[in-house]
């Protein structure tokens, strides 16, 4: 957005709080810090423990000395849902275990018992202070499950339950700034389920944010935005609290269209002539981000664009452009002809958005913003990039081509924010950016890598870059460039869910042959082997010639290589059931990787395996609730659903 960089100039202490720009990185599958492993007990054995064993389950739980057996029995008790309450005492005892794996499984089981475990909320509150973030996340989730299973209205709660939920609310508010994103996200969801009185919750939330350093607050805000519409009612109430007003507006801006219910409250802040300029500006930016649902604010924003000054006017001019407010035309034309620093460029851009059918206005904005790419002020350069990106849909084919070439120049800018804005704009151009990016492949080092990474980010629409990327893989002497090239081939080969590739069969065959040769050679650098195996997996069944090689690599002593090869083998031979037994534990490890793409692909692969991956259900359920990535959570939930459906 055009004003993302403006906030840096106007209010330096609170920078970088709007929607983040795209970052592009090389995928190399790896496991991050060790997280609790998935239950290792056999699913059928665990199921048998629920009713067919010689001893009652509660007795076995209390006497078990094997960690894996204990986890399997806890999971079996959890699967009994409310029927597992007879084992509650033993499960609560397991929360004292020295093993983090046992503690998080026990917390999960308490939540699945539901309303009958309401008396153990103090136990779960204790676990909110656990040193292991997965334990904390599961404890927070368990509190939510208990409240959701307790169907009483708040007014109908008895004193004991009201006290438990009140204590849980206070404890969970303290976790919205936890360093682990999974904990933050599930804490916010649990607070929403508890539905505490807002006059209790809002001051707690406001104080928590005020007392913390911005480096802690900012991730919490992003997590709240990730929670989606569930956070909006709470945020609307937070707008009325001076301590939280600014932060609430920031989150509402990130929520965008989902925050339509907040328009009236935001507009009241924006119109308050006695309000803090920073708060008014942020409220206006939130209205701009909400979009169509904020159209009713148009006339008021047009008046602010014409009559205000400073940051409020800058934000209002920008918002009028974003919302395409016709009533702002006269004011913006006057501003576009003025000599106020920077503002005429925003006004010209706004007029082009308001009148997309007016080719003269589009051309004027295009020329002014293109000139801004060379401005000495990096804020103007960044704003010009994002402004041009916003106009891409209105540009001619020739203008888009020229813009793509110009944007490749921004990738060498001295300022990171300008480089990131340029990269995001190139990705948005899609196929039209391909020729300019292919040109970068003819250069060397960082320029080549940037071109490859952006082609990969665009994906199949940039399939015209497949041949040049393959040439780069074969011809470069730089290992990192070659690794990037292999990854790019995989990204361009075939869109997920598509059976056919946009790349011609001859090019695919040549690429597969080259990749197989690279992964078969033990002298090939590890980085290159990882991404080459990944690329073969992305090619899918068209890489059938690599099947035997992938089966061999899946037994490698290099656990990372084995994991990627197992995943790739399933993609190349989706009907080969013999691979499941070997692939499943490796995919579970990938599901706990610190790489988002690795977790995403692992979740999808486990779902495709179906009932044979039933032992992965607890881990998939954990990821579906706690992963910081919305895409990974959705993929894990879908995988769990597939496994459950095929196993029923």
Image: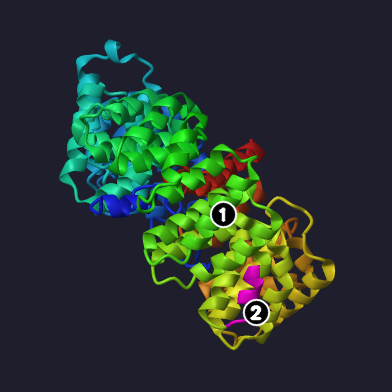
Label 1 belongs to which residue?
Answer: 366
Residue 152 at x, y percent in the picture: 35, 14
Q: Is residue 448 left or right of residue 173?
A: right
Residue 324 showing in the rendered view: yes
Give the SS element for disc 2.
helix
- Mark 2, other Cα within 10 Å: few <14 / some 14–19 / many ≥20: many
- Answer with the quarter of the image where residue 509 lies: bottom right
Read off the magenta span. 436-443
Contact check, label 2 and label 1, Cβ < 8 Å:
no
Q: Residue at x 20, y 19 (%)?
A: 160
Tell me which numbered mark, 2 or 1, is placed earlier along the sequence: 1
Q: Position of residue 229 (x, y in %)?
A: 44, 31
How far is disc 2 from disc 1 in space, using C-alphas? 47 Å
Query: Predominant secondary structure in magenta?
Result: helix
Q: Which residue is mark 2?
A: 519
| Viewer-nearest residue: 312 or 198 | 312
């Amino acid at each position: 957005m055009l004003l993302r960089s403006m906030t840096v100039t106007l209010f330096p202490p609170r920078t970088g709080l709007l929607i983040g720009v795209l970052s592009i990185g090389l995928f190399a599958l790896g496991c991050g810090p060790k997280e609790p492993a998935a239950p290792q007990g056999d699913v059928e054995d665990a199921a048998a423990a629920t009713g067919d064993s010689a001893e009652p389950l509660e007795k076995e739980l209390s006497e078990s000395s094997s960690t894996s057996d204990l986890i399997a029995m806890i999971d079996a008790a959890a699967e009994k849902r409310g029927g597992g309450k007879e084992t509650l005492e033993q499960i609560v005892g397991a929360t004292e275990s020295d093993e983090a794996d046992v503690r998080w499984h026990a917390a999960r089981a308490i939540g699945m018992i539901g309303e009958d475990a309401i008396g153990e909320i103090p136990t779960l509150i204790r676990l909110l202070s656990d040193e292991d973030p997965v334990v904390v996340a599961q404890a927070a989730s368990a509190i939510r499950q208990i409240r959701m299973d307790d169907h009483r209205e708040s007014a109908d709660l008895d004193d004991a339950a009201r006290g438990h939920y009140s204590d849980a609310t206070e404890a969970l508010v303290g976790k919205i700034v936890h360093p682990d994103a999974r904990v933050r996200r599930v804490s916010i969801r649990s607070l929403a389920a508890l539905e505490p009185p807002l006059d209790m919750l809002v001051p707690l939330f406001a104080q928590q944010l005020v007392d913390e350093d911005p480096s802690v607050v900012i991730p919490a805000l992003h997590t709240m935005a990730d929670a989606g519409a569930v956070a909006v009612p709470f945020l609307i109430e937070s707008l009325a609290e001076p301590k939280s007003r600014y932060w609430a507006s920031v989150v509402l801006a990130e929520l965008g269209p989902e925050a339509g219910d907040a328009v009236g409250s935001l507009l009241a802040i924006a119109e308050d002539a006695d309000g803090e300029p920073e708060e008014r500006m942020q409220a206006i930016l939130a209205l701009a981000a909400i979009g169509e649902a904020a159209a009713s604010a148009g006339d008021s924003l047009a008046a602010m664009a014409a009559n205000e000054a400073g940051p409020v006017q800058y934000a209002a001019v920008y918002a009028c452009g974003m919302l395409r407010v016709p009533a702002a035309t006269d004011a913006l034309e006057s501003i576009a002809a003025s000599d106020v620093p920077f503002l005429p460029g925003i006004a010209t851009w706004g007029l082009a958005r308001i009148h997309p059918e007016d080719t003269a206005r589009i051309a004027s904005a295009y020329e002014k913003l293109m000139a801004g790419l060379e401005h000495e002020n990096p804020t103007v350069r960044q704003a010009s990039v994002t402004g041009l990106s916003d106009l891409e849909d209105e540009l001619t084919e020739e203008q888009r081509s020229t813009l793509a070439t110009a944007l490749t120049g921004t990738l060498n800018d001295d300022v990171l924010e300008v480089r990131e804005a340029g990269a995001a704009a190139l990705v948005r151009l899609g196929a039209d950016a391909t020729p300019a990016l292919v040109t970068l492949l003819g250069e060397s080092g960082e320029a080549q890598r940037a071109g490859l990474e952006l082609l990969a980010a665009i994906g199949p629409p940039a399939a015209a870059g497949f041949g040049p990327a393959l040439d780069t893989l074969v011809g470069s002497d730089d290992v990192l460039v070659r690794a990037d090239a292999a990854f790019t081939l995989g990204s361009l080969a075939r869109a997920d869910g598509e059976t056919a590739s946009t790349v011609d069969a001859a090019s695919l065959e040549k690429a597969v042959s080259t990749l197989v040769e690279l992964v078969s050679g033990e002298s090939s650098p590890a980085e290159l082997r990882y991404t080459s195996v990944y690329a073969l997996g992305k090619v899918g069944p068209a890489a059938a010639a690599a099947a035997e090689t992938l089966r061999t690599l899946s037994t490698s002593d290099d656990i990372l290589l084995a994991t990627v090869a197992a995943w790739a083998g399933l993609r190349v031979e989706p009907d080969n059931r013999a691979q499941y037994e070997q692939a499943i534990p490796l995919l579970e490890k990938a599901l706990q990787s610190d790489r988002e793409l690795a977790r995403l692909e692992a979740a999808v692969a486990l779902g495709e395996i179906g009932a044979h991956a039933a032992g992965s259900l607890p881990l998939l359920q954990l990821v579906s609730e706690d992963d910081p990535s919305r895409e990974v959570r959705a993929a894990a939930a879908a995988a769990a659903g597939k496994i459950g459906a095929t196993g029923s």
